Amino acid sequence: MKRYLEAGEFVTTHGVTGELKLYPWSDGPELIALLPRLYLSPDGGRAVRLVSVRPHKGMCIVRLDGVDSLDAARSYVRRVAYFDREDVQLPEGRYFVQDVLGCRVLDADTGEEYGEIVNITHPAACDIYTVRGKGGEHLFPAVDEFLVSLDPAAGEVRVRPIPGMFTPMENGDEA
């Protein structure tokens, strides 16, 4: 498992006192606000302490320790920020997206393998897993009715799909 995960990208400066707009790639400003520091490399490296974080139109306005001018802030624009997974305490049953990607999707009753999770989106009330398998790519809603268990440590997701959920569409089938 990767130790340092993507928190988001610094997209622009904010004001003239060194604040930056961070577009969060995680659960949002709420998670970023809980972090004590960010890293500027996917393997950690130099940590930068977060002095303040506040939500602003789906983004975070952040103040980094030692960044106190517009010129100093400009050097961070277009850079990806990372956080140490050790700095976040996830609630029971919650996992980082990074840990779920690549998990094998297995039928909870038969053990049949449907494929592996290659993408996760959150367009509405639930996560949608893109499962790539022998029948192509299929979208799977990660809801209690279908999702039986999630075990990233074992690299497995057990599901109970409805008929047709993982079968390829035939010509003439409607999407």
Image (cartoon, rainbow, N blue to C red):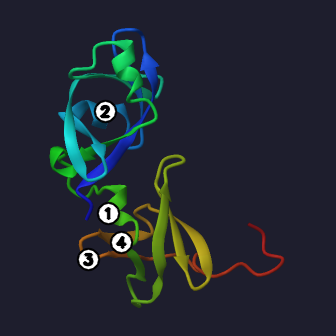
Disc 1 secondary structure class? helix
- Where is the C terminus found, in terms of image quarters? bottom right
Disc 2 is placed on an element classified as helix
Instruction: Confirm or deny contact between disc 4 and disc 1 (CB under 8 A).
Output: no
Gap in Å between the C-alphas at discs 1 and 2?
20 Å
Q: Is residue 29 visible?
A: yes
Q: Residues within 10 Å of mark 4 (few under 14, many from 20)?
A: some
The kind of residue tagged 4 is: Val
Disc 1, disc 3: CB below 8 Å?
Answer: no
The one of 19 and 135 positioned closer to us in this rendering:
19
On the picture, is 132 further left or further right than 35?
right
Mark number, residue 30: 2
Q: At label 1, which amino acid type do we have? A: Asp
Categorize mark 1 by other alpha carbons within 10 Å: few (<14), some (14-19), many (20+). Answer: some
Q: Count all numbered tags in the image, as a single digit.
A: 4
Residue picked out by circle 1: 99
- Left or right placement of residue 68 versus residue 76 in this view: left
Q: Can you tell which of label 4 and label 2 is closer to the viewer?
A: 2
Residue 112 position, x and y percent, is: 44, 89
Number of the front mark, 4 or 3:
3
Nearer-N-terminus badge (3/2): 2
Q: CA distance from mark 3 to mark 2?
A: 29 Å
* Quadrant of the image occupied by residue 46: top left
Q: Which residue is mark 3?
A: 154
Residue 170 place in picture, x, y as percent:
76, 81
Q: Which residue is mark 4?
A: 148
Residue 47, horizontal then vertical, whole percent: 19, 38
Q: Earlier in the sequence, mark 4 or mark 1?
A: 1
Question: Is residue 164 visible from the viewing direction of this image?
Answer: no
Q: CA distance from mark 4 to mark 3?
A: 15 Å
